[in-house]
Amino acid sequence: MPNQLAKEKKHWRTAIELPREVFEVWRKPERALDPVAVVATVNPDGTPRTAPFGSLRAVTPRLLRFITWHGHDTYANLCRDGRVMVALLAPPDIAVSVNGRARVVREQMNTDEQYAVVDIDIEEVKNDMGRSVVIESAITLSPVDQYRGWFEAALGELEEM
């Protein structure tokens, strides 16, 4: 029962910035890809589009940043319509959705001119964690060997911004 009471106290519904525990998970230092975030954008016809991103990380409790390829639907959608929703699941008890506005802050990365850096200004954070479950695993990615160096360089550039 004490654990249940602690969980009840910890539960929150919405916030204007990332709570400390969410921010810590999403900072992802040292070129980490995990946990992966799912980014949702709006297609030209108004339908939703989702895609996973390992590069997404928290810069501050009010700002997220990630890398995207110029040819990706996510990039095209964000350039046309900056509305975005980002979901994160992380064991054992973080499930959040972040509503925000995206903007390209670096059109071409030094690492690869076909990639851009996008910032998301957080407007609302919603707690999606159920009180009766725990998350046992998160979405994870690993670069294939031939791209490991590219990821190291690109994520290093992202972290230095």
Image (tube, grey):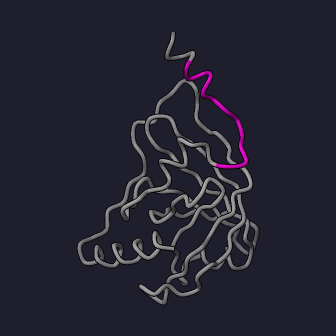
Residue 160, position as x, y percentages in the image: 46, 73
Q: Is residue 13 magenta?
A: yes
**Looking at the picture, does residue 153 appear above or below residue 28?**
below
Q: Residue at x 39, y 42 (%)?
A: 137
Residue 106, position as x, y percentages in the image: 58, 82
Q: Classify residue 132 as left or right of residue 121.
A: left
Q: Residue at x 60, y 77 (%)?
A: 75
Q: Is residue 61 magenta?
A: no
Magenta stretch in the rendered image: 6-17
Q: Classify residue 145 as left or right of residue 17.
A: left
Q: Classify residue 91 as left or right of residue 12.
A: left
Q: Quadrant of residue 13?
A: top right
Q: Residue furthest left?
A: 145
Q: Residue at x 58, y 35 (%)?
A: 129
**Looking at the picture, does residue 12 appear above or below residue 104?**
above
Residue 31, position as x, y percentages in the image: 37, 65
